[in-house]
Amino acid sequence: MAEIDPALSRLAAAHKVATEFWDWKGHHVDIAADTLVAALAAIDVDASTPEAVQAALAEHELAAWRRGLPPVVVMERGRPARFDAHVAAGSPADVWVRCDNGWRIEVRQIDNDVPDRQVDGHLVGRASFELPGDIPLGYHNIVLRSGPQTVETSLIVTPSYVGLPARLGDGRVWGFMVQLYSLASKRGWCFGDLVDLADLAVWAKTQHGADYILINPLHAAEPVAPMEPSPYFPSSRRYVNPIYIRPEGVEEYGGLSDKRRRRIAERRRDLAKSLADEPAIRRDAVWAAKRQALEEIFAAPRRPARTMAMEAFFAQEGEPLRLWATYCVLAEDFGADWRQWEPEFRDPESPAVVSHAQRRAEAVRFHMWLQWMAESQLASAQHRAQEIGMKIGIMADLAVGVNSAGAETWMMGPLFGRGVVVGAPPDAYNQSGQDWLQPPWRPDKLEQAAYAPFRAMVRAILRHSGGIRVDHILGLFRLWWIPAGHGPGQGTYIRYNHEAMVGILALEAKLADAVVVGEDLGTVEPWVRDYLLERGLLGTSVLWFEYTDDGRVKPPQDWRELCLGSVTTHDLPPTAGYLAHDHVSLRHSLGLLTESLADEIAKDVAEQGAIVHMLEGRGLLAQGERDPHAILLALHRYLALTESRLLCVALVDAVGERRTQNQPGTIDEYPNWRVPLGGEDGHRLTLEEIYDLPLVNELSTIMNEA
């Protein structure tokens, strides 16, 4: 690879664009110059020529000097923090903090030896200040007054440590993980919903002692067909997919006439009949039938107090909710991909968009009402879980990003990088790398927005849950950006302000008294896990991936205490399928392996063999026993011996399912996220049918004995 111009390297470093990294095999990799130029272009930095690089470096130097205060200051409570202000040379600078409770806290100026400099024809001076460490947690403002000018910026004070809520005590808790959509009940709409979630929580706690249900992301998908099946590829992470609403659970359903209720019941029965022989979940059919029912309920009269509550919700959510609902209406009228709309509708603030929303005001209100209903039923599920004694209740999941054609990129376009997508470099499991087709948030724009979109998203998710799992939490530190025209192996890492983003996550968790679990699997810089531990955020440990540095199966006493431990994860087959090497055979059939099937099977046999021998050596599995059922139980006995404070049982393991929900690196080559929950014989199971399965009792007994 040709040597990179040092000036380009400096420019990349200034904008947190990596020029090198270490791959999954431990090899040092230099990033190609064209990748760096494309990554910089995605954040509006021109590096196309040597002259452009020099100009961009000079512009970066001056950027801070042109601002009176930084876009945002994020600090940990208990640790004084320094920041710089810029004023006309020789002018006084008076700075204080205006707290969210109205308090005023004076800020001390400290010495610096930075000389004044010419900026755009004016002499500008730099003054440095130190924030005291005892500012209360929360969102405040820093105020700078210099002569006749007053400037403000956001101050975010975060907890230095989150840890586990006091209600968990010193012991351990366990729960089930489930893809909610895959688990439909007999009275549901062929799709797991929020009423099913509440019932699942009651069963899990009262019959088995579980303290949480970890679910897939409930993020909103497109409002029209075809609806994206992946919960990790949403239209918006801020809002809930209304397909999870149970129509009969809406209060106004009870006020409908007998004729209308019968019509809704017939619609549900017709749906069940039409999908009876379908091997995969059909979201489009489910949403079409359910939406008709919800439209009838929306049109029904409401009690005055209900109308007041609805309007209060609309007011509380404000302009973002109205914009989301407007997108939904435009998607219904012009198609889900806003990039294909007429130019006047691609700008959410355009007169054409405003006019269209006014003409379709009732449809806009319907989509706002759907969010109110989804929030209400989600709140009810969490309340029910807590009411029957779950210590955590519902644990939500936060996806890495969004669909480039969806609502968020339309609503907040400038926040996203142009001409790049997020993915992952090649690793042991995906040897060609991954392209997730998701546009990344720009670190600079997030900072300029004082992280408000991130704050709002996390707060909304934690509003009705006792915990949050952050998928690929490494994305708060760095993301693998793949420029257009480049393959997954030709990207580079972009650094984010992890102290700010992890700090905000910690703050919102502290305010909600919630658990935070970071999915920190894959290619991870060692210091990242150390940092998460220092901040009191739990990591993730999957038994199949836990090895010591010298390649041995990690003993249970060496597992992390602050982590969520499980045998498997949603990106692997259930244990029955894993033991049968289904994941290797599937990747081979899809052309995802770079080595031969025989070699990969042999490698998998060796890895599983090491774990099985470890189980035998610890007396958790009888010598020579190779029955998958016995191995499954032994794996969970091993899990129970670990130090992990949170233990997790995959519901697919508890019912004997063998099929995987998702094959990373594919879209439609495999029916990802469309596999209904099935039993050992492949028969589709309803929620009610899992209640008496003996394997569930065996696994819960092991967990409770822990």
Image: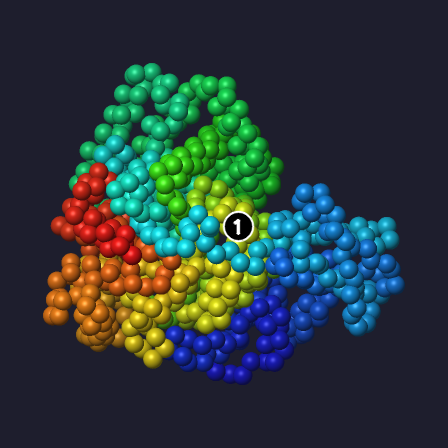
Q: Is residue 7 visible?
A: yes
As drawn, 87 above or below 314: below
The picture places residue 201, in percent across and down from the top left corner, at 32, 41
Quarter of the image where one finds residue 101: top right
Residue at horizontal 30 percent and vertical 21 percent from the top: 261
Question: Is 204 placed above or below 311 here?
Answer: below
**Which residue is at the front of the view, 393 or 164?**
164
Q: Nearer the viewer, residue 90 or 548?
A: 548
Name which residue lies at 49% across and 59% down. 536
| Residue type marked 1 | Lys
- The colour mode here is rainbow
Q: Where residue 588 sits in the image (x, y, percent)? A: 23, 67
Residue 157 on image: x %, y %: 62, 54
Counting from the top left corner in percent of width and height, residue 580 is at: 17, 63
Is 355 on the left-hand or right-hand side of 187? Answer: right
For the residue pair 330 and 68, the one nearer the viewer reads as: 68
- Looking at the image, is 534 positioned above or below residue 265? below
- Of 19 and 548, the residue lying toward us: 548
Q: Is residue 155 left or right of residue 331?
A: right
Secondary-structure class at tag 1: helix
Camera sees residue 224 = no
At x 59%, y 55%, the residue is 158
In the rendered image of this protein, does residue 216 appear above or below residue 373? below
- For residue 252, side relative to residue 83 (left or right): left
Residue with the mark numbered 1: 510
Residue in the picture at 79% in, 62% down: 109
Mark 1 residue crowding within 10 angstroms, few (<14) / some (14–19) / many (20+):
many
Instruction: Pick the quarter of the image with the C terminus.
Output: bottom left
The number of callouts visible is 1
